[in-house]
Image (cartoon, rainbow, N blue to C red):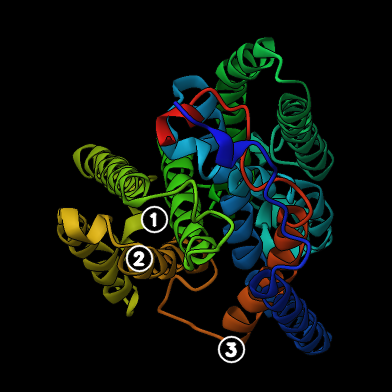
Amino acid sequence: MNHTPLATPVLLPADHVLQRMQRAALIAGVCGLGVCAAAGFVTPTQFFRSYLVAYLFWLGVAIGCLAILMIHHITGGAWGAVIRRILESGTRTLPLLALLFLPVAVGLPYLYEWSRPDIVAHDAILQQKSVYLNVPFFLARAVVYFTVWLTIVRYLNRWSLEQDDTHDPGLARRLELLSRGGLLVVGLTMTFASVDWMMSLEPHWFSTIYGILVMGGQVVTAMAFVIPMAAVLAATPNGPLARVIAAEQFHDLGKLLMAFIMLWAYFMLSQFLIVWAGNLPEEIPWYIHRAQGGWQWIALVLVLGYFVVPFLILLSRDVKRRPRLLARVAIAIIVAQVLDLFWMVTPAFHPEGISVHWMDAVMLIGVGGIWLWAFVGQLKGRSLVAIHDPSLPELA
């Protein structure tokens, strides 16, 4: 079996597509954040609310990439080998996201009612939860989350690079063992992070499945992001991935995307059924706020656009084997995930009815532009193919 095409690293220092993408992303990010920052002096509350949604979305892409990367190291397979470098680049944006968490920390009084002593003083439930929901402990937990994630990312990427240089078979075993434990640790820390950063926006409400639901959406988002990137990089006969990625791998990625969507829908339905069956006063307001005042239309769009329509389309084998068509479906799912996150977060601020501000869209572009700029920067300059990945012979 001849593996000659994989003998030389495929580097991207002069790739025009990525250069243009990175430049455009930086311009969009700087302009978007600049406009929102200027408006934030007039309406700081809206600034921080819009920033939180945008931040959580792009953080979800990075955490989702980390989860999928570890799943690949555990299970192997050609599907993961061809997108491994894209996933690794996504994980290496976490230092930037740790820095971008600072506005969330600064904006705590604008976002979380439990962070305001005047409100806590008149709320018995918040007083009971103040042992956990207080500003110093909240910030300390955030430091722990990012420390854990960055440590895992560091060794996953370090050993992956060593694998390219040394061809040491023991490194694959190390990556697998780290991923086995890392997947559990990331799941645990992300569960607490979702409670801290999202569920505590409505501190009187709780759900035991909330963290799993959030992580399910992150994995869907990451896979939906990776597919268009892989399609772009493999678009031409001389493209960086053209020699190693084929219709079979896009077929696998499409099947995984469909599986992740089904898993997300299962988690969403499970939470709804648990709350509906319990019918408790402390649980049902979360859904009541999201089923009236215009929010119900977004819920309907999510049912159709995030699950029903993509599921039916992805049943087609032909769609999954056509990169451009699969990429369009993935982009539509990304839009649906933005709506899902908006639907989960924003009603906490506007329970009386739907509210959309221009800053919501511009902030997504601003934070996303900076994130994409960093992502492409990580993607460039390294071998786009994990040369000694044990799964690569499957591609020959």
Q: Position of residue 363 (x, y in %)?
A: 66, 77
Q: Are marks 1 and 2 in contact (CB under 8 Å)?
A: yes
Q: Is 158 placed left or right of 56 in the picture?
A: right
Residue at which label 3 appears: 358
User: Can see residue 207?
Assistant: no
| Image vertical order of residue 60 relative to residue 77, above or below | below
Mark number for residue 290?
A: 2
Secondary structure state at the residue bearing disc 3? helix
Q: Residue at x 62, y 17 (%)?
A: 172
Mark number for residue 286?
A: 1
How far apart marks 3 and 1 lie (CA) works out to 25 Å
Q: Are marks 3 and 1 in contact (CB under 8 Å)?
A: no
Mark before the other along the chain sequence, 3 or 2: 2
| Quadrant of res 209 | top left
Label 1 sits on what residue type? Trp
Q: Residue at x 53, y 32 (%)?
A: 3
Q: Position of residue 95 (x, y in %)?
A: 81, 47
Label 3 sits on what residue type? Trp
Query: Tag 2: Cα neighbours inside 10 Å, few (<14), some, or many (≥20)?
Result: many
Secondary structure state at the residue bearing disc 2? loop
User: Can see residue 86?
Assistant: yes
Between 10 and 324, the residue placed more toward the observer is 10
| Image vertical order of residue 347 relative to residue 251, above or below | below
| Quadrant of res 273 | top left
Between 387 and 346, the residue placed more toward the observer is 387
Where the C terminus falls, by quadrant? top left
Of labels 3 and 1, the one closer to you: 3
Q: Residue at x 49, y 56 (%)?
A: 242
Label 2 sits on what residue type? Arg
